[in-house]
Image (tube, grey):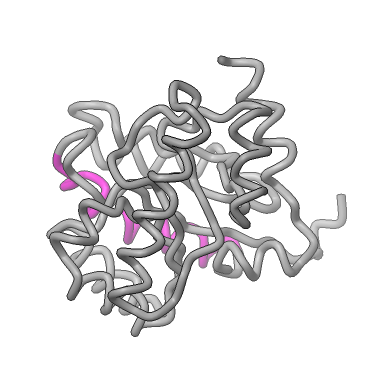
């Protein structure tokens, strides 16, 4: 592998928005790093001003369902409702309908993947997890785990929402260290659409990876 070839990273945040999202946006603004936020519809309904700020500051917004279920347990009709209700909520706030989708818990299979494609949604998973959803995860360990797990091109899973896996203090505390390490090692920050535009189709191998763990 050519050590001089570009390195790319997508910072992605799930489960928001929440009050923690404000802190995360402040950090991203400081470092001029854009990210992709996979938003839960019921949380967007609570915090429309934060959704507007995410969009206004140049970040990309994706769909993370309305109520954060394991979509593999849903019927096709139930999955459609989760997607449509969230897209409608986001469209009402920023006048844009997302076409990116991240399944809660990373749970996806061939049936739900096919149904999402019918709905015009592109599934997006990750190849580096921060494990920040674990309770009592120390911020130093969190950032170290991300840094040692990096690949040439990365989609990193982080969380800004607090309704489904607890407070996000450690994520907020670890984020500057993670970003500084990425900058020091010459990673360029991309949104998920930009990542795909560069020819990286990670949803395919991510789905194969997660199918092995269902």
76 sits left or right of 1 in the view: left
- 168 part of magenta stretch: yes
Q: Between residue 208 and residue 22, name the one nearer to us.
A: 208
Q: Between residue 12 and residue 152, name the one nearer to us.
A: 12
**One can see residue 103 in this view:** yes
Against 34, residue 42 (above or below) is above
Q: Which residues are magenta?
A: 167-185
Which residue is found at the position 22% from the left and 35% from the top?
164
Residue 201 in picture, x, y percent from top left: 74, 51
Residue 92 in picture, x, y percent from top left: 30, 74
Residue 150 in picture, x, y percent from top left: 59, 44
Which residue is found at the position 16% from the left and 47% from the top?
169
Q: Quadrant of the C terminus?
A: top right
20 sits left or right of 36 in the view: left
Q: Which residue, as the protein is rendered here, is positioned at the far front?
A: 77
**How many marks overall?**
0
Which residue is found at the position 45% from the left and 66% from the top?
35
- 179 part of magenta stretch: yes
Q: Between residue 88 and residue 62, name the one nearer to us.
A: 88
């Amino acid at each position: 592998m050519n050590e001089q070839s570009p390195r790319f990273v997508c910072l992605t945040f799930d489960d928001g928005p929440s009050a923690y999202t404000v802190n995360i946006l402040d950090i991203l603004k400081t470092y001029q790093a854009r990210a992709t936020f996979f938003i839960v519809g019921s949380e967007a309904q609570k915090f429309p001003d934060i959704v507007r700020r995410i969009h206004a500051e140049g970040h990309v917004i994706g769909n993370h369902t309305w109520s954060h279920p394991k979509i593999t347990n849903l019927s096709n009709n139930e999955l459609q409702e989760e997607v449509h209700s969230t897209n409608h909520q986001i469209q009402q706030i920023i006048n844009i309908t997302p076409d990116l989708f991240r399944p809660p818990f990373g749970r996806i299979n061939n049936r739900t993947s096919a149904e999402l494609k019918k709905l015009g949604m592109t599934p997006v998973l990750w190849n580096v997890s921060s494990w920040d959803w674990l309770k009592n995860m120390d911020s130093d360990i969190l950032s170290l785990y991300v840094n040692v797990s990096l690949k040439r091109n990365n989609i990193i899973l982080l969380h800004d929402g607090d309704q489904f896996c607890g407070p996000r203090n450690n994520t907020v505390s670890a984020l500057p260290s993670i970003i500084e390490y990425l900058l020091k090692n010459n990673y360029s920050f991309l949104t998920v659409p930009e990542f795909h535009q560069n020819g990286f189709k990670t949803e395919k191998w991510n789905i194969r990876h997660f199918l092995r763990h269902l």
